[in-house]
Amino acid sequence: MLSLVPERGRPLNAENPTGGIYQATFGNGRGLITYLLLADQDRVDVLQVTWIDLDDSR
């Protein structure tokens, strides 16, 4: 998804929507990727990946 349509994520800072840092959910909303979009360089840098495990069987 990030390599095809990186602009699909939500801006991290709503007051600065063109600031270049975005977030996108994945895994039915259980994961969150925070990434830096450098459109002029055709580059996406992943800054953080968070996964929430809701398995209560442990």
Image (spheres, rainbow, N blue to C red):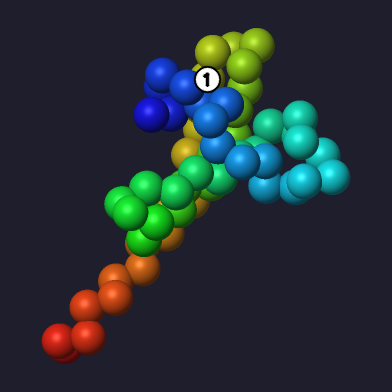
Residue 33 image offset from top left, x and y in percent: 46, 47
Position of 53 with respect to 18 (left or right) is: left
What type is the residue that disc 1 sits on? Arg
Where 44 sits versus 26, above or below? Answer: above
**What secondary structure is found at the residue carrying circle 1?**
strand
Q: Is residue 19 in view?
A: yes
In this view of the protein, which residue sits in the foreground, 21 or 9? Answer: 9
Position of 32 with respect to 23 (left or right) is: left
Residue 28 image offset from top left, x and y in percent: 33, 54
Number of disc labels: 1
Where 40 sits versus 10, above or below? Answer: above
Q: Residue furthest front?
A: 28
Q: Residue at point 53% right, 30% down?
A: 8
Quadrant where the C terminus is found in the figure: bottom left
Residue 57 image offset from top left, x and y in percent: 15, 87
Q: Residue at point 82% right, 39% down?
A: 16
Q: Residue furthest left?
A: 57
Pointer 1 local density, CA inside 10 Å: few below 14, some 14–19, many at least 20: few
In this view of the protein, which residue sits in the foreground, 23 or 37? Answer: 23
Q: Residue at point 39% right, 56% down?
A: 29
Q: Is residue 47 in view?
A: no
Where 29 sits versus 6, above or below? Answer: below
Q: Which residue, given by chain and number where applicable, does mark 1 sit on? A: 43
Q: Residue at point 61% right, 41% down?
A: 10
Q: Residue furthest right?
A: 15
